[in-house]
Image (spheres, rainbow, N blue to C red):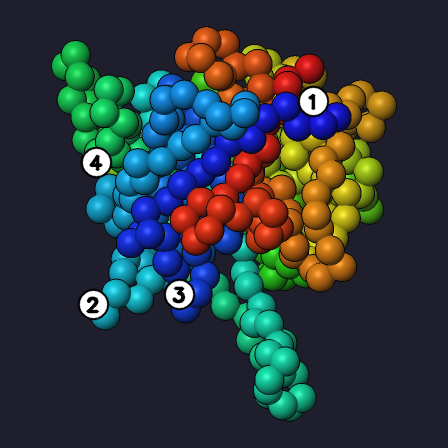
Amino acid sequence: MNRTGTVVLEFDPHLNKLRKDKKLWDGLSAVVQIGDRLWVANDEALSLERLSRQPGTLDGEIRYADHRQFPLHEVLPLPMPPAADGKIAEADVEGLDYQDGYLWLVGSHSLKRSQPDEDDSVERNVERLTDVKRDGNRFLLARIPLEPHSQELECVIEQGGHSRTAARLAGDEKTNELTRVLAGDEHLGPFLAVPGKDNGFDIEGLAVAGDRVFLGLRGPVLRGWAVVLELAIAEQDASTLTLKPIGPEGRPYRKHFLDLQGLGIRDLCRQGSDLLILAGPTLALAGPLTIFRWPSGARPERESLVFNAALPTVLELLTDAGPKAGQEQAEGLTLFGLDRGEATNMLVIYDSPAPRRRRGTRAVEADLFVLP
C-alpha cells in the first residue's frame, strides 16, 4: 500500500538540539494525535513535544509547527530529575496515548548496553560491551492531565469539583511496581536482566482502554511469539498509580502471546475494540515493518495466545532502511483525522529518518496511510 499523504513536523531550532549535531527528529519514538495537535517524544530526551496543525495544505502535504516543549520533571515527580548542571537521565519514552483528559506515557523499562566506537581500541570496545546501565527514568508509566482547550500539561487540573492529577506507577531509580511483580514471571522474569537490544525486556507500545493499559513488548520475543501485557490501573494516592489484580491467581497483569511472524512490537494503537500493532525486528537490524490488526484485542476476556491467521496484515511498510542497523525504523503509530472528524488514516513516524524525509535542519516527514 502506497502512502496517501505526507505530514511535515517542524521543530523550533532552539529546542531541536539534543547533543552535538543530533536533532529531536532524529529519534522520534512515539506519537499521538489529539484534536489539531500532535504530541511526539524523542527516546533520548526528558520531555514531550507538542506541534500544532497549520492552515492549508500544499500538494496533499499537511504541516505541523508551533513547537512547544514540556519537560517531564515540571509535571511529574521523576525518579531521576535533571542534575544541577542540566544533565538528564533519559526517560526513553516509547509510547503515548490519550484518554479522559490524560496524556499517558511509558518508558522502555529496559537496560542498555554501551556501543563500540569505531575510533577506539579493541580492548576499550570489548570493555564497552560489558557496560550495562539501568536508568531510573526509563521505568515510567504515567499519566499527566491535559488542559482541554490549550492542551497544556499540568500537575493538577480542577474541573467540576474533581481533581485530575499527574501520577506515575510507584518506583525508584532502579525499578518500579511492574518490574517487581514481573521478576517472578515464568516467561518474562529472566529477561529483565537482559538489555533491551539483546532481546531483553523492552516496552515500545502503549494503548489505553478504560482502566486497562496495554503494553507492547519489542522484546523478549519467545520462539517467534511477541508479548502484550495488559494492566489494570488504580490510584494509590493523588500522585501514585498502582496495579490491580486481573490475572490468574490474582496476578496484577495478563499476558497475551501473538504470532507476528517473529517480529517484536514497536507501537500499539487502539481503534475501537481492536488493537493495531506496529511490528518490526527485535534486535538492531534492518527487517520487515508490518502493521497487524488484533480484532477485539483491546477487550480480551482472559489471557490469550493468538496465531498469525487471526492477526490480519493491515500494511507492509516500505522504507529506505539500508544495511546499517537502525536506519529508517518505523517507531510510532497513531490514528489520524484530517478534518477534526473521525480518524480515517494512520500516521507513522520514523526513528533515524532517511535523508529524503529531512527538510533542512528543522523539519522531517511522516507518512500518512488510509485506514482499511
Q: Position of residue 141 (x, y in %)?
A: 42, 41
Residue bearing mark 1:
294
Please state which of the two labelled residues, at mark 3 or mark 2, is closer to the viewer. Answer: 3
Q: Residue at x 28, y 57 (%)?
A: 81
Q: Position of residue 6 (x, y in %)?
A: 56, 30
Please state which of the two labelled residues, at mark 3 or mark 1, is closer to the viewer. Answer: 3
Q: Residue 140 versus residue 37: which sits nearer the camera? A: 37
Q: Nearer the N terminus, badge 2 or badge 4?
A: 2
- In the displayed image of the protein, which residue is found farthest to the top? 341
Q: Quadrant of residue 272?
A: top right
| Callout 1–callout 2 Cβ contact below 8 Å | no
How far apart marks 2 and 4 lie (CA) works out to 22 Å
10 Å crowding of disc 2: few (<14), some (14-19), many (20+): few
- In the displayed image of the protein, which residue is found farthest to the right? 309
Label placed on residue 19: 3
Q: Say what amino acid the circle numbered 2 marks.
A: Ala
10 Å crowding of disc 1: few (<14), some (14-19), many (20+): many
Q: Nearer the N terminus, badge 3 or badge 2?
A: 3
| Residue at disc 4, secondary structure | loop
Label placed on residue 84: 2
How far apart marks 3 and 1 lie (CA) works out to 39 Å
Q: Say what amino acid the circle numbered 3 marks.
A: Arg
Q: Say what amino acid the circle numbered 4 marks.
A: Cys
Q: Position of residue 12 (x, y in %)?
A: 32, 47
| Residue at disc 3, secondary structure | strand
